[in-house]
Image (tube, rainbow, N blue to C red):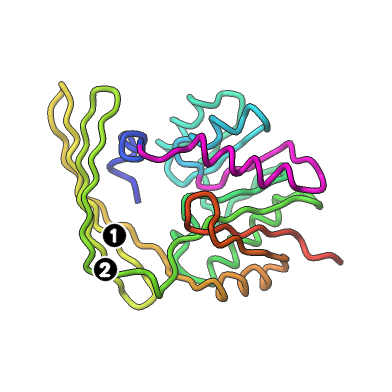
Amino acid sequence: MFDLSSKYYDVIYSFKNYQQEANMIHEYLIKQENEPKLILDVACGTGQHAYYLKQHYSIDGIDLNPEFVSIAKAKNPEGQFYTADMSSFKLEKTYDVVMCLFSSIGYVKTLDNVVRTLEQFKEHLNEAGVILVEPWFTPEVWNAGRVDTLTAEQDGIKMCRMSYTEKHDRMSVLRFDYLFGSKAGIDYFSETHDLGLFSVDEMIRAFHDAKLEVEYDEQGISGRGMYIARRKPL
C-alpha cells in the first residue's frame, strides 16, 4: 500500500488525466434513467476524481489511508471523507452512485472479499442507484518479471520510480522503489503492493453473488474496463 509514499501520491500520478476520466464518468452517469446527485467514491485516494466531479455532483469518499483522506478533505471541503475499509465500512447515508476506480478493487485480494465488498457497496446504494467498478488486470495479461521506470516532476519535487512485477498464483505483486528529490533533500522509499487477479467471468459471478445485475465495458475510462452494476429487481 501507499503507506510511505502517500504524501507524494499526486506527484507520482501527475501523468494521470483525472479531468478526462471524470468527464467520462459523467458521461456514464448522464445516461442513467434517474439523474444521480450523490456519489460515494470508495478508495478515493487524494480526492482528485472528486475534485473534477464535484461541479456536477455532491461527493463523499472513503479510503483506508488516513493521509489520503486528509488530502482529499483539503481539496474537497464540500464533501465528507472518512478513513474506512471498503470491505467493511458503515456510513449512515446512501448514494445514487458508489464508484471504486483506479483498480482499487484488486486490493481486497480474494473473490470472497470482492463479494463482501460489493455487498457493502449495495448497502450504501439508493434503490435506483448504480455501482461503477474499474478492475485490476486479469490473470492472463499479468506478466511477472516486468521492469518499468516512471519519472515525474511537480511543485518543485522530482520523482523516479522503478517497479518490478511478480505473480504468486492468483496474486499480482508490485515492488516499487522511489526516489523523491526537492530542495529539502532526497527521500527513498520501497513499497510492495499485493492485488488479486480476477478474470472477467469471475468478477461477473461476484456481482451476481452480491445480488447485482452487471454489464461490462471492456474499455472503461482508462483501458482497464468498467463494471456497471445495479440492484437485481425483486
Looking at the picture, how far across and down is residue 89, in whole percent?
A: 59, 51
**Left or right placement of residue 192 versus residue 38 in this view:** left
Q: Which mark is residue 166?
A: 2
Residue located 53% across and 42% down the image: 21
- Residue 94 appears in view: no
Farthest left residue in view? 185
Label 1 with label 2: CB-CB less than 8 Å: yes
Residue at image position (29%, 23%) is 155
Residue at figure coordinates x 61%, y 24% from the top left? 78
Residue in the foreground of this view, choosing between 193 and 22: 22
**Sooner in the amino-acid sequence: mark 1 or mark 2:** 2
Left or right of residue 155: residue 113: right
Identity, as a three-letter code, of the amino acid under mark 2: Glu
Q: CA distance from mark 1 to mark 2?
A: 6 Å
Q: Examine the image and state in which quarter residue 61 appears.
A: top right
Q: Secondary structure at mark 1?
A: strand
- Residue 70 placement (x, y as % from top left): 45, 31
Residue range highlighted in magenta = 15-43
Q: 104 and 199: which one is in front?
A: 199
**What residue is disc 1 on?**
174
Crowding around mark 2 (Cα neighbors within 10 Å: few <14, some 14 to 19, many 20+) is: some
Query: Which residue sits furthest right?
Result: 234
Q: Is residue 116 visible?
A: yes
Magenta stretch contains residue 39 = yes
Rendered view: 50 above or below 28: above
- The x, y position of residue 156, in whole percent, is 24, 23
Q: Nearer the viewer, residue 97 or 191?
A: 97
Name the residue at 30% across, 72% down: 167
